[in-house]
Image (spheres, rainbow, N blue to C red):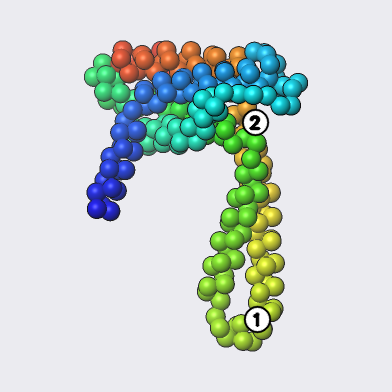
Amino acid sequence: MLFQYWNIIQGFFNWVAESAAIMMVLSGAMAITWLGYERKRRGSFTKRKTEVEKFNVTKFLRGMSYVGLILGVFVIWSGIMGLILDIPPSFQYRDVTADEANHFACIFLIVIGIAIFFKPISDLPLSSILGLVIGSITAFIIALVIPDSVTNFLGTSVVKWAIVIIFIIVSVVVGLTAKFYIGTLQKISKFLSWPPIAFIIMIFCFVQGFCLWIGGFSIFANLL
């Protein structure tokens, strides 16, 4: 039964890798929710920052925003696998244009997938969470592998404090390192979800996606 579920999961991810055009269209649909969410939050279509701290947003828009956590993974996977395995974005593209990946579409999917993933969690302290998780795992592994002879020689109290210190050091180092990279990705996500930019992304995703999916060609065929 376990292998059966694994085959289903593997088959699904294989389908996602072969469906870059569909992932492009779904990214356009997600950009629509950005338009609604950010337009309501900011109180304007063009404002970069909201002047109202509290706002009400429909449960549908909020729910769709968090769907991006899952969709973002699929979109990134589609772009990466398309580049690595040279997979055409659709069967129609394979038959009409070429049996190879469209590099521009793949790179775009990776970028927009990252934005989709980070959009609903842009306000969470991800770097701190990651630091605590890595620190906890490190401390747990050290506690498991440390020999009894060392514990007996140094004493239980010394070993416990050493593990605590290691946990703190690892958590801080990982947290500070991740803060820079995650902060950069979150800023990119916020910029791409700004309503005017999100509108352009929505139009592009729909046009390019349907061209790849139904027409079998790319509007940027000669790029990359």
Residue drawn at point x = 45 percent, y = 36 percent: 70
In the picture, the quarter occupied by the C terminus is: top left
Q: Residues within 10 Å of mark 1 (few under 14, many from 20)?
A: few
Residue 91 appears in view: yes
Report the amino acid beneath label 1: Thr
* 5 to the left or right of 63: left
Occupied quadrant, residue 181: top right
Q: Is 127 situated above or below 111?
A: below
The x and y percentages for residue 81 are 37, 36
Left or right relative to 114: residue 165: right
Task: Please state which of the two labelled residues, at mark 2 or mark 1, is closer to the viewer.
Answer: 1
Horizontal side of residue 156 vs 118, given as left or right: right
Q: Which of the 4 quarters of the picture holds residue 10?
A: top left
Q: Earlier in the sequence, mark 2 or mark 1?
A: 1
The amino acid pointed to by label 2 is Lys
**Residue designated by label 1:** 156
Q: Extreme right residue here?
A: 51
The image position of residue 47, as x and y in percent, is: 70, 16
Kindly report the distance in space between the C-alpha atoms of the residues bearing marks 2 and 1: 45 Å
- Residue nearer the viewer, 48 or 218: 48
Q: Which residue is mark 2?
A: 187
Whether residue 107 can be seen here: no
State the residue at coordinates (68%, 24%).
Answer: 55
Please state the horizontal and vertical placement of residue 179, each as a whole percent of the image.
Answer: 66, 44
126 up-or-down from 89: above or below: below
Residue in the image at 40% along x and 26% along y: 23
Position of residue 203 relative to residue 155, above or below, is above
The image quadrant of residue 83 is: top left
